[in-house]
Image (tube, rainbow, N blue to C red):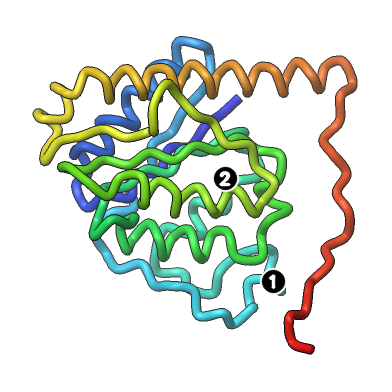
Amino acid sequence: MKVILINGGPHKDGCTNFALEEISKELNKEGIDTKIMWLGTKPIGGCIGCNSCLKQDNRCFMKEDIVNDFLEEVEDTDGFVFGSPVHFAAASGALTSFLDRAFYGRGKLFSGKICASVVSCRRGGATAAFDQINKYALMSNMYIVGSSYWNQIHGTNKQEAMEDLEGIQTMHNLGKNMAYLLKCIENGKAVGIQKPKYEAPTKTNFIR
């Protein structure tokens, strides 16, 4: 089993990455492979709704950033953790653009997989950003993992985040919960339990 953790913060070794590392350690203890991907500081273009990705094997025509590298690994990955610092009570612009393009038209690619969101902040806006990131999974038939509190950690830098003992405990419990659910799904497959078969999409037209 494998989990990819996305660091959507501008600092490779900042608060968000620290939280992801704590989750990764718990997953590793349970025998689950992990990979942390940093989005970096180069621009990530937002989705322009061209629909070309729907015609070329789920890949985006923008090839200058990390989105397609991530999509190459989705099919063989069982779970995901999307992490971001809180910017104006929202996820970072980089992570938002990344998720818009990664998820657009790809519900089937992510369906049935485990997902968790993590946010880091100095003080406020955490739950708003947390809610924003969760919405990508909620409309893709993914299973969202919670913890003993909102999946957030506080601090203006890694050193301060390391002093947020409740935040660290939240990350540890999140890792434990994710490992448990991944194992439940894996064991379910072994005894013949299949993924749900969903109805064909029906689009509601609100224009009368």
In the image, what residue type sits under mark 1?
Leu
Residue 73 is labelled as 2
Give the amino acid type for the residue marked by disc 2 in the picture. Answer: Glu
Residue 96 percent across, percent down from the top left: 40, 61
Dot 1: element: helix
The residue that appears at 19% across and 24% down in the rendered structure is 164
Question: Which residue corresponds to the image point at 24% horizontal and 60% vertical from the top-left?
Answer: 88
- Position of residue 41 relative to residue 133, above or below, is below
Callout 2 secondary element = helix
Question: What whole-number distance in Å separates the C-alpha atoms at marks 1 and 2?
Answer: 18 Å
Which residue appears at 52% of the width and 32% of the height?
3
Q: Which mark is residue 54?
A: 1
Q: Position of residue 58 (x, y in %)?
A: 65, 63
Counting residues from the N terminus, which is met first, the one under dot 1 or under dot 2? 1
Quadrant for residue 155, please give it: top left
Nearer to me, 67 or 97: 97
Task: Locate the C terminus by quadrant.
Answer: bottom right
Q: In the rendered view, would you say 134 is above or below 202?
A: above
Quarter occupied by residue 167 = top left
